[in-house]
């Protein structure tokens, strides 16, 4: 049995019996790491364990909490192999620079081809290890990963934005066909988990700003995976439309996606949103190519 199945059993156990129940389950059904499939000793984390922060300052560093939540599902080796994004970065697209002494500045790509969005930031590096975990979430339906990933994203959000800086949070929409076959929008689930991670007022208010009815995917596109930069731009052009212009007009919008590769998808979202009157469009992703 996989740890994901065990986890749901753990969550429904009565409060007083939870730790005994968890020990029993872990003994009878030792969980396997979602990524490397090895048996491992999971950390104990209940959904309530996330709600320990009471002020914005307390939630500034959610990394240990995000790692504990991940360690319920994945072994420590797989959790520790996830690389955080570190400065210096491109001031616009968030690309990591190799020279550690440099300040943030624009990368060559953003100078040659200015982006429609204002800034893009991410929680972790997109590499083989992070893609292995993200694929388990997106393609194997391991939606229990939404909360630890959400914690990583909330940590990144509070690192780069003031809690009140954003009026509207829009997950990159899936086309109806894809949504039906997958059953969920991974970006929506990650942000929706913020309410369970933290009950601090400004963060809890994000829930009201999270909308899925504003930006829609009007064109079914082939997956961007495996396409070159030019093909990606062509593939995604005109894919999005804004359904509720009045919800966007004059608003500071945050577009949320799982992975930033060339930025073609989020930049196309930004183009549609600015055309509909958004004051600015920023981008937050779980992982970013380096
Ligand atoms: Zn592992
Ligand atoms: Zn850049």
Image (tube, rainbow, N blue to C red):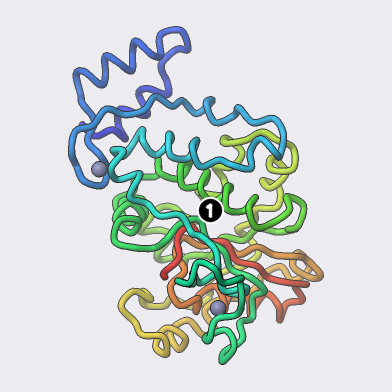
User: In front: 256, or 165?
Assistant: 165
| Quadrant in which ligand 2 is drawn | bottom right
Question: In the figure, is residue 197 to the left or right of 128?
Answer: right
Q: Where is residue 241 in the image (x, y as percent from the top left)?
A: 61, 76
Report the residue marked by disc 1.
188
Which quarter of the picture shows residue 228? bottom left
Q: Position of residue 108 (x, y in %)?
A: 53, 86
**What residue lies at 36% left-to-right and 28% top-to-bottom?**
43
User: In front: 206, or 52?
Assistant: 52
Question: In the figure, is residue 263 to the left or right of 275?
Answer: left
**What residue lies at 74% left-to-right and 68% top-to-bottom?**
248
**What residue lies at 46% left-to-right and 60% top-to-bottom?**
258
Q: Quadrant of the N terminus?
A: top left
Q: Is residue 32 above or below residue 250?
A: above
Q: Is residue 107 above or below residue 102?
A: below
Dot 1 alpha-carbon crowd within 10 angstroms: few under 14, some 14 to 19, many 20 or more: many
User: In front: 49, or 191?
Assistant: 49
State the SS at label 1.
Answer: helix
Q: Position of residue 117 (x, y in %)?
A: 64, 75
Q: Where is residue 18 in the image (x, y as percent from the top left)?
A: 40, 14
**What residue lies at 64% left-to-right and 31% top-to-bottom?**
53
């Amino acid at each position: 049995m996989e740890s994901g199945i065990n986890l749901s059993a753990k969550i429904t156990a009565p409060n007083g019996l939870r730790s005994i129940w968890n020990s029993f389950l872990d003994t009878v059904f030792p969980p396997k790491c979602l990524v490397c499939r090895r048996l491992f000793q999971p950390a104990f984390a209940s959904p309530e364990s996330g709600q320990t922060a009471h002020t914005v300052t307390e939630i500034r560093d959610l990394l240990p909490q995000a790692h504990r939540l991940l360690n319920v599902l994945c072994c420590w080796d797989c959790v520790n192999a996830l690389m955080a994004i570190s400065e210096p970065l491109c001031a616009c697209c968030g690309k990591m620079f190799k020279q550690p002494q440099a300040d943030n500045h624009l990368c060559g790509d953003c100078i040659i081809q200015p982006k429609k969005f204002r800034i893009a930031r991410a929680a972790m590096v997109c590499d083989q290890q992070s893609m292995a975990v993200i694929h388990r979430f997106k393609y194997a339906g391991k939606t229990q990963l939404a909360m630890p990933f959400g914690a990583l994203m909330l940590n990144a959000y509070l690192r780069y934005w003031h809690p009140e800086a954003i009026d509207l949070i829009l997950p990159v929409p899936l086309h109806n066909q894809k949504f039906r076959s997958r059953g969920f929008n991974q970006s929506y689930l990650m942000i929706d988990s913020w309410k369970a991670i933290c009950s601090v007022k400004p963060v809890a208010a994000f829930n009201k700003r999270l909308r899925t009815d504003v930006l829609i995917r009007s064109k079914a596109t082939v997956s961007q995976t495996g396409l070159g930069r030019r093909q990606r731009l062509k593939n995604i052009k005109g894919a999005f439309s804004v359904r509720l212009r009045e919800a966007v007009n004059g608003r500071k919008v945050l577009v949320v996606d799982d992975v930033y590769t060339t930025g073609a998808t989020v930049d196309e979202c930004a183009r549609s949103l600015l055309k509909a009157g958004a004051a600015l469009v920023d981008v937050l992703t779980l992982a970013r190519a380096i």
